[in-house]
Each structure stands twice: as C-alpha cells, then as structure tokens.
Image: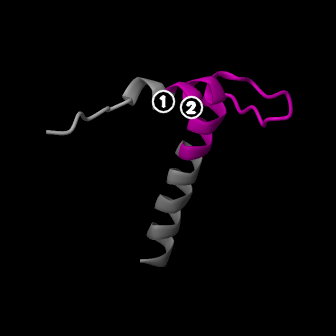
Amino acid sequence: MSSSDSGGLMSSAGLVRYFDNEDRNAISIDPKTVIAFCVLFGVFVQILSLTVA
C-alpha cells in the first residue's frame, strides 16, 4: 500500500493567506447595499413580469 499524503491543511494555507490580505485598491461594497440592490432588482423583475404578461 502506498502512503497517501492528503496535505489538506498545507494546500489551503496559501489561500487563507491570500484571502486574508486586504488590498487597498480592492472594491469595497457594504453588504447592506448588495441586499438592497437584490431586493430592488427582484421588485423590478416582478413589475416587468406583471406588465408583460
């Protein structure tokens, strides 16, 4: 039998370090803004479906 080296923790360490780093040039959007946009988009789609049907 061959020894299987899963390396799960070691392989994800780079991703954790990459996503943990905050970039100053990155776009920052407030989660409340995203939820408000989704709700407004849903209302817009509902109004469109009522007027087309």
- The residue beneath circle 2 is 15
Residue at position x 56%, y 36% in the image: 35
Give the image quarter of residue 26. Answer: top right
Q: Amino acid at mark 1?
A: Ser
Is residue 26 in the magenta section? yes
Dot 1: element: helix
Residue 4 x/y as whole percent? 26, 35
Disc on res. 47: none
Q: Residue furthest bottom?
A: 53
Label 1 near label 2: C-beta < 8 Å?
A: yes
**Which color scheme is applied?**
one colour
The front one of 2 and 29 is: 2
Dot 2: element: helix
Q: Residue furthest left?
A: 1
Residue at position x 51%, y 61% in the image: 45
Check the picture and name the quadrant holding the N terminus.
top left
Residue at position x 74%, y 24% in the image: 22
Q: Amino acid at mark 2?
A: Leu
Disc on res. 12: 1
Check the picture and name the quadrant holding the C terminus.
bottom left
The front one of 26 and 13 is: 13
Give the magenta part as a residue range: 13-38
**Total marks placed:** 2
Q: CA–CA distance between discs 2 and 1?
A: 5 Å
Q: Is residue 5 above or below residue 48?
A: above
Task: Indicate left or right for 34 with 39 as reference.
Answer: right
Give the image quarter of residue 31. Answer: top right
Predominant SS along the magenta part: helix
Task: Indicate left or right for 34 with 43 as reference.
Answer: right
Residue 15 x/y as whole percent? 56, 31
Is residue 1 in the magenta section? no
Task: Indicate left or right for 13 with 9 as reference.
Answer: right
